[in-house]
Amino acid sequence: MTSDTEKYLDTNSYRPCQSGIKDCRKRLPQAIVIGAKKCGTGTLRYFLRVHPQVAFSKHVEIHYFDVPWKYKNGINWYRNQMSPSWPDQITLEKTPRYFVCGRAPTAIHDDISPKTKIIILIRDPVKRAVSDYLAVKHMEGITKITFENITVKSSHLTPPYTDPIYYIRSSFEESVLDSNGSINIWNGLINIGLYANHIRRWLQVFPKEQILVLDSDEFVQNPLKRLH
Ligand SMILES: Nc1ncnc2c1ncn2[C@@H]1O[C@H](COP(=O)(O)OS(=O)(=O)O)[C@@H](OP(=O)(O)O)[C@H]1O
């Protein structure tokens, strides 16, 4: 998943396709990997990118539906972020934050198509939370932005919220537990892992036949089986 690998895939594509060649153009995605964050979405993209019938977006994550300034750019801007595809290829993108984004289900339904397929990976929520915690801590080290003592407001989690608020302290346990020892479900570390709550919102917009939920733990052990 290094940038060298990405470059190799770009220049050695099995079915090179460039805008301008007959029938080869950028299309809106027929399927979107919406998350969840830290559940193996990067690995799924990595595998699917080499499938000859898949045109996965070159950008690792597009964040069109969850980032207001990108959404304001409009659907043509979004289409332009996709990889060019042949008519028989499926265009795909992945942005794990869509999973928790309040406006994403309706916007995908209305702006792309009610027939859009939704792919969700889920994983043991505790392992997901620890992975997320370590990633945010790492980011804290790089950006020097401190996440310590960020106030958690449940109002941030009403639609169209774009990101659960993270409450990160020096240890994982301190981060996820309230002073009375109960789990703070409004902390993004926990909230993203309340999969049922989020999937319920997607099911209010898309029929269950269009939503594929994959067990990421199984995907680690037997990726080929899950890819079929
Ligand atoms: N094949 C496969 N299947 C499932 N999970 C895998 C796989 N490969 C990697 N991983 C683990 O997934 C974690 C990263 O998930 P994401 O790629 O979704 O992260 S991100 O949201 O895009 O940042 C990250 O978890 P942690 O290692 O616990 O941090 C990866 O190790």
Image (cartoon, rainbow, N blue to C red):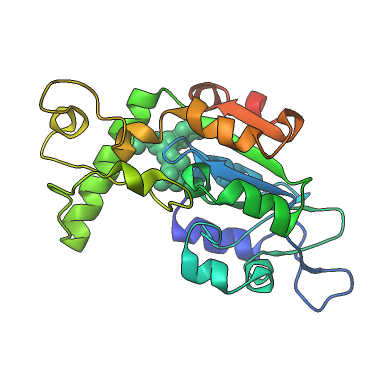
Residue at 39% from the left image edge and 44% from the top image edge: 157
Residue 144 against residue 198 in the figure, above or below: below
Is 133 in front, or is 40? 133
Q: Position of residue 217 (x, y in %)?
A: 48, 23
**Which residue is painted at 76% across and 64% down in the image?**
27
Name the one closer to the observer, 14 or 171.
171
Residue under the image location 13 percent in, 40 percent down: 169
Q: Which quadrant of the render holds ligand 1?
A: top left
User: In the image, residue 173 lies at what x, y percent?
Assistant: 16, 27
Q: Across the whole image, how many numbered discs are drawn on residues?
A: 0
**Residue 63 seen from this side:** yes
Q: Image quarter for residue 212?
A: top right
Q: Answer left or right for 180 relative to 73.
A: left
| In-image side of 213 versus 160 (left or right) | right
Q: Is residue 188 left or right of residue 215?
A: left
| Nearer-the-camera pick, 151 or 128 | 151
- Asked if residue 212 is positioned above or below residue 148 in the image, the reply reads above
Residue 61: give x, y in percent of width and height: 51, 57
Q: Is residue 49 visible?
A: no
- Residue 134: which quarter of the image? top left
Q: Quadrant of the C terminus?
A: top right
The vertical placement of 210 against 140, above or below, is above
What is the x, y in percent for residue 17? 76, 67
Q: Residue furthest bottom?
A: 20
Residue in the picture at 33% in, 24% down: 126
